[in-house]
Image: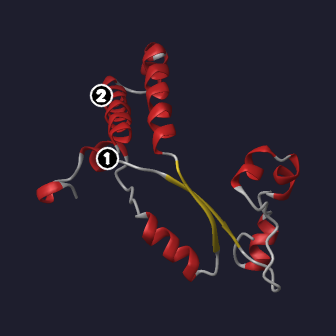
Amino acid sequence: MGERGHESFIARHVFPDGELQTIHDTLAAAEDMGFEVCDVESLRRHYARTLRQWGERLEARRAEALTLTDDVTYRVWRLYMAGAAYAFERGNLSIMQTLLASTTPTGSLSLPLTRQDLYTSEAATTRIATPSREAIAANGHAS
């Protein structure tokens, strides 16, 4: 619900069943599940730019978009992307990327030591892999 108990535009038209959690609640839940929080990075400024580019691309392909949906939905998404980009630029909205990991019984992690290593090291790319469904099933979670 938005202010004064009214449903927000986003809740009503964009993400009707969406539920946003605070970073505090998200990290607390992850830690309660046994994950170690290895990194938290704000992508607020990046996401503002991303939303602006998505909006521009949607407008550039308006005719194609209207073959897939109606004009009302098209306008809702244009408005959402412009408004959300503005809110991210002003600092009224934020989005965080988190890196969580499970430690081995000895406490080690198969992750690079720094964020810089995550972005530049070829070895880091090969060490951080998406777990298989079998691994998740065997461990009860992604490790």
Task: Please give the label number shown on residue 92.
Answer: 1
Label 2 environment density (alpha carbons within 10 Å; few <14, some 14–19, many ≥20): few
* Residue marked by disc 2: 72
Q: Is residue 69 left or right of residue 117?
A: left
The percent coordinates of residue 66 (x first, y second) are 42, 20
Residue at the location (41% across, 50% down)?
A: 94
Residue at the location (41% across, 64% down)?
A: 21
Render colour scheme: secondary structure
Quadrant of the snapshot with the C terminus:
bottom right
Q: Nearer the viewer, mark 2 or mark 1?
A: 1
Vertical comparison of 137 with 56: above or below: below
Residue at the location (23% across, 49% down)?
A: 8
**Secondary structure type for disc 1:** loop
The percent coordinates of residue 33 (x first, y second) are 59, 80
Q: How many numbered circles does the render carry? A: 2
Q: Is residue 142 left or right of residue 51?
A: right
